[in-house]
Amino acid sequence: MGTLTALMSVSSQALQADQTALDVTSNNVANQNTVGYTRESVTFQSSVAVTVDGVVTSGVNTGPTAVSQRDRVLEQRVQQQTQAQAQSGAIESALQQVQSVFGLSSTSTSSSSTTLGTAMDGFFSALSLLASNPGNSPTRQGVLAAATTLTSAFNSTSNQLAQISSGLDQQVASDVGQVNMLTKSIASLNGQIATLSSHRDAGVLENQRQAAIVQLSQYIGLDQVSTEGNGISLATGNGTLLVGGSSSYSLSTTQIAGTTHLIAGPAEADITASVTGGQLGGTIYARDHQLSGFTSKLDTLANGIASEINAQTALGVDESGSTGLPLFIIPSGVAGTSGIISVAINDPLKIAAAGSGQGITGSTNAQALAMLSTANIVGGTTGSGYYSSLLAEIGSATAGATTDNSAQQASLTQLTTQRDALSGVSLDQEAANLTQYQRSYQAAAKVFSVVDSIMASALNLGVTTSVA
């Protein structure tokens, strides 16, 4: 009887273990489409052996809980690649907006095909016509009209770049809000995990924390460290702590010279320049380095053309014989020129076409003005040459950002596929497991049934009764 009792205990344990395995398999199938879910599995292990009448019996169990199939190193690589991809994506998006402002495309970077390039060509063409016929009133009016078109093109381009910068500023503020929300959630999950499962896999809680960290990686670059109590500590690349245990440390924003900056810690340190990775890192880099650089070069172009034109008009005389007045209004410095440049005169008779000592029909100064189109007046090159160089730089930067983002996305896809192969739910594998556990359960149930029948027969001394 002792042996039969032990055998019944073994089959009973097998039934319980197989039922647990079936439950885990069913849970995996049910959560196949749950974002952040990690596949769980059971580990069958022998129970403590018991000797009964010289026979060693040992049942089976599956441990206290199912185990999530996760690789923490691989998960961190996915997070790091997510940060790189999000940063390159933000840079690409900003540069595509800049490219659109200048009217460029992936197949065309010609200055003559852009609004500003056409306005520059039109302005110098109007000056050439003036040199040919300085006394013609419509020709003089055409110069003012072309100058107005040029200044409007500069103003419009500058304003659109400013709008992009403002949009990136708003994106920074929005991203900071998302970062703070996610770090607070991760810290809360750290606390729950430390309380409920500080020494083993926390299952659903760890899935939620991992999903939150991946989402956080889309916004900002992170360094991750595992801590005691099954916790995770998170910091930015420069060491600014975001999550420590069950505590989170929020970022804030402030306006400095009209630009949104990131502030962190009790000392309210400005960490804007040191933030890398994620959408925040990409947005800040595009705003503070690339966009500001293009705007600065646009200002240089506008200031160079206007300054040289104004300097040349001062050497000529208008139709009344007076010294030529500046044709453009520009600031004292280069910065901001493209946004505020305007035409200084509205009377075509005030255009200084004649040279000093010539009559009102002279054209020496008009010829000098027209020749500025081929003179090195901006950054050691011609105005059109400088502008073409700027367009080439924008096109090259955008193409490079697109290529980089595609490569980062490919790497992320590869890593995600590797992680999903381990942690994702495969319906084919779960179907195979389900069949295996069902057969095992049926076998254990058969053993249990046979032992039960034998025990009933022994108790009834072989006499068939209603007792079972």
Image: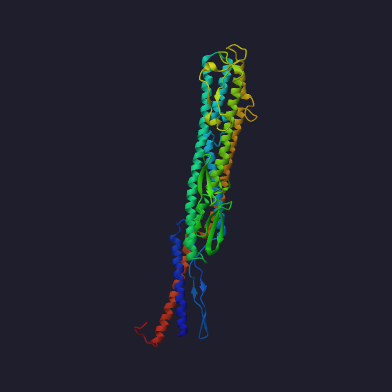
Q: How is the image coloured?
A: rainbow
Residue 173 rendering spot, x and y as whole percentages: 49, 45
Give the residue displayed 56% in from the left and 41% down from the top. 288
User: Would residue 428 be seen by someone viewing this image from the given angle?
Assistant: no
Would you identify the image quadrant in which residue 352 lies? top right
Would you identify the image quadrant in which residue 1 lies? bottom left
Tell which of 322 and 211 is nearer to you. Answer: 322
Residue 87 rendering spot, x and y as whole percentages: 55, 47
Quarter holding the C terminus is bottom left
Up-down: is 385 above or below 281?
above
Give the residue displayed 35% in from the left and 85% down from the top. 465
Residue 37 rendering spot, x and y as whole percentages: 47, 59
Tell which of 239 and 283 is nearer to you. Answer: 239
User: Would residue 400 be seen by someone viewing this image from the given angle?
Assistant: yes
In this image, 439 relative to 106: left or right? left
Would you identify the image quadrant in which residue 362 lies? top right
Up-down: is 218 above or below 95?
below
Up-down: is 340 above or below 453?
above
Residue 193 rendering spot, x and y as whole percentages: 49, 63
Q: Residue furthest left?
A: 466
Tell which of 140 and 453 is nearer to you. Answer: 140
Tell which of 371 and 255 is nearer to you. Answer: 255
Give the residue displayed 47% in from the left and 59% down from the top. 188
Q: Residue furthest front?
A: 267
Up-down: is 452 above or below 29?
below
Q: Residue furthest top?
A: 359
Q: Tally the marks.
A: 0
